[in-house]
Amino acid sequence: MITLLRSLRVGLHVLFAFLLGLGVVLFLWEDPARAATTPVLPLTVTLALVYVVGTVWEHSVSTPPRGVVWWWLAVVTLLWHALVAVSITFVWLLFPLVLLFLHLLPRTLGVVAATVLWGIAAFVPAKLHPGEWTAGSAVGPLIGTVLAVAIYWTYVALHREAAHHRAVADDLRATQEELAASEHQAGRLEERERLSREIHDTVAQELSSIVLVSRAVRGSLERGDLEAALRQVRTIEDQASDSLGEARRFVRDLAAPGEPVPVAVRHLIHRTLARQEALGEPLSIELQLSGDTDRELPEPVARAVTRAAGELLANVVKHAGATRAVVTYAVWDTEVTLDVIDDGRGFSGAHGYGLRGLESRVAAVGGELLIESDSDGTAAAVHIPLTSEKEPS
């Protein structure tokens, strides 16, 4: 569209040059003897120079001063009028001049100027060249003027359409950029939330255990029980080693544990029991397996189940005050389940950060977390369909 509009403008200037040259050729062809007695050639050269200079200047400034434009158009009109007064062959310059006036003048003034130009083309030859003038000499320029007006308004319509399409394209581009920025920001927030959950479910839990056991060591030392303190220090060493392993996996793009889920759950239970023993708060944890637990799970599902076991066991020892817990891991044809039941004091109210993060993690692989709690204990169940291929956040 833009190329078409530029071609129309270039075509206008080419048409003006062609008609001006044609007028000179026809004038010299019809009456070569008059060329020496009339100022046709000087007027033609002057009009050409004025037209070229004005056109170049008009294109070089973004908003030409209106007064300068009007003076330039007046000079062009006077020079053309002088040529028409010399020879009727220059009448057809009317067509590009009407287009030029309509382009540079306001709408109403442009139409008035087009009418004046038609009057010059139609009636100046009638007075100065009556022998060459006929009714067609007025009708022909009238048709040319009407055609020029119609072409100009078509040009205006095309220009407006092109501007509209440019505006739509700009809006679309801006919308796409805003959408890309929003998606980028959403991705950053989602990644931040994922990192927060990973830190909470791995390193933070292990460090919390180390802090608790280290406090128990201080208590044992204050009582003079060096044997108990030594056991607790060994527990801290084991917990720190496990935490270091988790941190290394975390650095390696948060990769899922390389061991099967049952093995990972057993390690979680072992670490939990060791910590509780070191704290002097013994806890009995039983692991039950059902279904095809040797089946290899998709990595996102395996990671979600392992993290769920860690979070639920952490809640048992930190909040429930339980003496016994049962962990049931089951793999069926269409889903995998993990149940953690304890005999603690239960809870009510909104979930904390850990459980909210666990709900998001399980939901990310198409599963659900169900929790029932009362004064007799808490039962938490995770159900994840094995058809899910989504990566947990």
Image (spheres, rainbow, N blue to C red):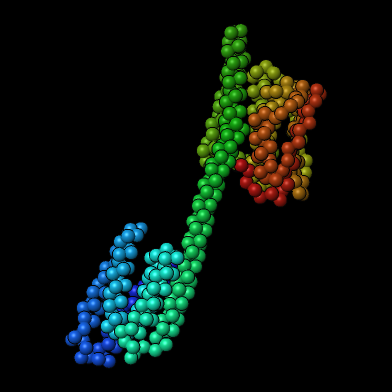
Residue furthest top as drawn: 223
Q: Is residue 366 above or below residue 221?
A: below
Q: Residue at x 59, y 16 (%)?
A: 215
Q: Residue at x 56, y 24 (%)?
A: 237
> Which one is in front, 180 or 43?
43
Q: Position of residue 239 (x, y in %)?
A: 58, 26
Q: Is residue 216 above or below residue 372?
A: above
Question: In the image, 293: left or right of 74?
Answer: right
> Which one is in front, 353 or 123?
123
- The answer to whether residue 164 of the structure is visible from this angle is yes
Q: Residue at x 65, y 18 (%)?
A: 279
Place residue 236 in its image quadrant: top right
Number of callouts in the render?
0
> Which one is in front, 215 or 28?
28
Q: Position of residue 19 (x, y in %)?
A: 33, 81
Residue furthest left as drawn: 36
For the C terminus, the quadrant is top right
Place residue 16 in its image quadrant: bottom left
Question: In the image, 333: left or right of 156?
Answer: right
Q: Position of residue 114 (x, y in %)?
A: 41, 72
- The answer to whether residue 1 of the structure is visible from this angle is no
Q: Residue at x 28, y 74 (%)?
A: 79
